[in-house]
Amino acid sequence: MNLPKQAPNWSIALVLIIGVLAVSTSSILIRLANFSAGAGGLGFSLVLAASRLTLSALILLPAWRQIQWNALQPGTRRYAAAAGLCLALHFALWITSLSYTSIAASTALVTTNPVWVALLSRFWFGEKLSKMSIAGIAIALTGGMAIALGSAGAANAGSSQLLGDFLALAGSWAVSLYLLLGREAQRRGLGIGGYIAIAYTVAAIVLLPLPFAFGTTYTNYPNIVYFYILLTAALPQLVGHTILNWAVVQISPTLVTLAILFEPVAASWLGYLVFGEVPAPAVLAGAAVLLLGVATATVGAKKITVNS
């Protein structure tokens, strides 16, 4: 099997940290766009998601020329396209959740994907987790849930907390599939540039017409809104998501999703700095538990050998 060359452990860790920090800015930029536009809900959320992915896909147009189509194994393009569909669903669900629940709750719930990725990896790739890793996942998820529950009474949480929380959780299911499908597409011969070009383009095509179905347009917003959209395409999407897609080929997908659990901590801190969303004591306690769980799972995890 023609697989990407595995990078040294230290470089994987360093790049993954950058990726997690990049995706942590996403909820802040989305909330800023919502406030600047004076809009929210599903229609405007779809505008943000579609615009973000369309800009990313346009920037990646040169990557299409580098795809060696004849060298791809059967099913590679289907995996990449399916990943794009899951990415579109993830953003439609998760971005909408930010209109109804707090940043801390939304990011905590959307990063529960270690459970879903671990379960899928067990049956799909035959990946086995050590007892310490399983314990770490349980501890980390307990911390994530504490963050979500502790933020329920936040001032900016919105009037439909339960709906927002469910949308964020469903977004976690979609992004878990997206990461695993992307891993498989890359293991079957697609380079990271070609893969994200296909996945981001498919997601953009799926999302582009949807805002019109909800009576929402792409025009007549303040200029600052388009600046925030550009930032979401450049930072959390092209930097953050691309790094995460690269990392799932280098190491266990479960370890990647465990690293993503740092996102609610970083996003909650940014939410405090930008919007004054003060985390409740339960949120702070949950963050400490989450970090403990990530450390436990990382120590106990075994790297997948990717040169099989």
Image (cartoon, rainbow, N blue to C red):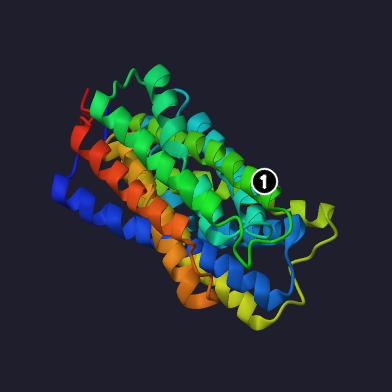
Q: Say few, some or many: other residues with alpha carbon within 10 Å of mark 1 (under 14 / 14 to 19 / 20 or more).
A: some
193 to 73, vertically: above or below:
below
Q: Is residue 182 visible?
A: yes
| Figure quadrant of residue 300 | top left
Q: Is residue 301 left or right of residue 107?
A: left
| Figure quadrant of residue 224 | bottom right
Q: Position of residue 152 (x, y in %)?
A: 60, 55
Q: Position of residue 247 (x, y in %)?
A: 31, 44
Nearer to me, 239 or 301: 301
54 to 115, vertically: above or below:
below
Question: Considering the image in quadrants, where does the N terminus appear?
Answer: top left
Count of numbered circles in the view: 1
Q: Is residue 275 left or right of residue 5?
A: right
Q: Residue at x 40, y 59 (%)?
A: 284
What residue did someone put label 1 on?
206
Q: Is residue 192 visible?
A: no
